[in-house]
Image (cartoon, rainbow, N blue to C red):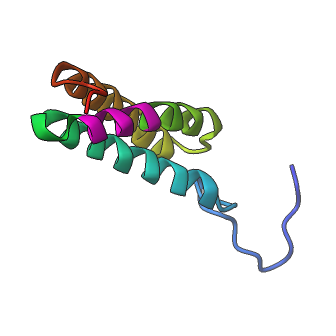
Amino acid sequence: MPQQAAGAKPEPVGARTESHRYQDVLAVVAVTIGLAALVLGWIPATHFPGAVAGVIGLPLALYSQMISATTNERWLNVIGMVASFMGAAFALSNGGFSL
């Protein structure tokens, strides 16, 4: 057990000691693209951008899940994965990649 310097305050349990900016930003981008894919895929007139957003968002969320460091990032990644998949599915049912 490491010794603390005299007068040093112990860190609270669960304190975040290092920054995970890259993982945080990637998780937010994954959920944003996923929600965009869901909305665009739901609207029949925007099926093409919805399909593209779903195809980009799902692998991005999977990669972000693989490198995530905190539970909050993992929650956002799962939401992004599900939203991307559902958005791509809606987009494909409305016409998919056809212009």
Q: Which region is colored magenta?
A: 48-56
Residue 50 location, quadrant: top left
Q: How many marks?
A: 0
Q: Give the residue at x 14% y 34%.
A: 42
91 lies above or below 8: above
Q: Give the residue at x 12% y 39%.
A: 45
**In the image shown, does 82 or 59 lie closer to the viewer?**
59
Left or right of 86 in this view: 5: right
Residue 38 x %, y %: 23, 37
Residue 31 x %, y %: 38, 45
Whether the magenta-drawn stretch holds residue 30 is answered as no
Which quarter of the figure is the C terminus placed in?
top left
Residue 74 x %, y %: 48, 38
In the displayed orientation, state which residue is furthest to the front.
Answer: 99
In the displayed orientation, state which residue is furthest to the left.
Answer: 44
63 lies above or below 16: above
Left or right of 72 in this view: 50: left
71 lies above or below 87: below
